Image (spheres, rainbow, N blue to C red):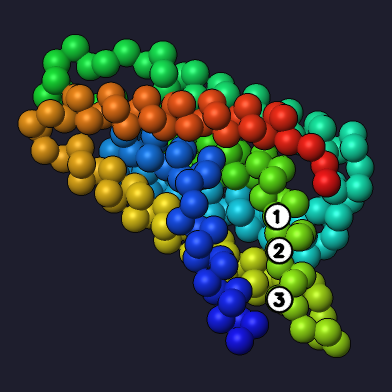
Amino acid sequence: MTYFTFLIAALVLAVTPGPGMAYVVARTVAGGRKEGLASCVGTGLGGLFHVLAAALGLSLLLAQSALAFSLVKYVGAAYLIYLGVRLLMKKDQAEPGAPVIAQGARRAFLEGILVEALNVKTALFFLAFLPQFTQPGEPLAGQVLVLGGICVALNTGVDVIAALGAHRLLKSQVGRAARARLLRRLSGLTMLGLGAWLALAKRS
């Protein structure tokens, strides 16, 4: 029953929009399916960074240290706001049917890692959420790695669906420019909002 509850909670959290999903949609709009999927892999690796940190106890240090929390929080918030502003300031294509200019799958992959790795809320979430489903008497680090890996896998799966969905919406030439502009602006505003929310987050 405990694992079933964990899976339900993890799935609900996976489909909840966050920095990773917003970035994946934004990259798909900017560079197509290839960049969108590359960013999914990046956000997945960024999530695994937090899982490993939680397993090694680094997240506990982050939660206890006001200086460490503030440093990572503001760096992550500033990066999200930077990405949001860049999306909102990006000019539309001069020709509605012209292909979207790509920036490369490698850059999308690396930025995806940064977006998720700099999200301090993910670190604190894993620290607070995963131990509730561990079994006493069993090695804690191993359990956290397994449970965290499941969370990351679910998140990445949802991100892939979001990327493919965004790509499908943009595939048709009819209204393509308008949809791209709408998705880009929504993603940009979401990143700005998440960045502001992260900057105002307080240690509990």
C-alpha gap between disc 2 and disc 1: 6 Å
Camera-side residue: 71 or 6? 6
Counting labels gives 3
Q: Are marks 3 and 2 in contact (CB under 8 Å)?
A: yes
Q: Is residue 28 left or right of residue 193?
A: left
Q: Secondary structure at mark 2?
A: helix
> Residue at label 3?
133
Image quadrant assignment for residue 198: top right
Query: Mark 3 is on which residue type?
Result: Phe
> Residue at label 2?
129
Q: Is residue 195 left or right of residue 102?
A: right
Query: Mark 1 is on which residue type?
Result: Phe
Q: Position of residue 145 (x, y in %)?
A: 69, 70
C-alpha gap between disc 3 and disc 2: 8 Å
Mark 2 Cα shell of 10 Å, populated few (<14), some (14-19), many (≥20): some
C-alpha gap between disc 3 and disc 1: 13 Å
**Residue 80 visible in the snapshot:** no
Upstream in sequence: badge 3 or badge 1: 1
Q: Secondary structure at mark 3?
A: helix
> Residue at label 1?
125
Query: Mark 2 is on which residue type?
Result: Phe
- 51 to 175, vertically: above or below: below
Q: Position of residue 172 (x, y in %)?
A: 11, 38
Q: Are marks 2 and 1 in contact (CB under 8 Å)?
A: yes
Q: Secondary structure at mark 1?
A: helix
Image quadrant assignment for residue 22: top left
Q: Residue furthest left?
A: 174
Q: Which residue does the image show at 67% across and 50% down from the upper left?
A: 122
Q: Which residue does the image show at 60% across and 44% down from the upper left?
A: 116
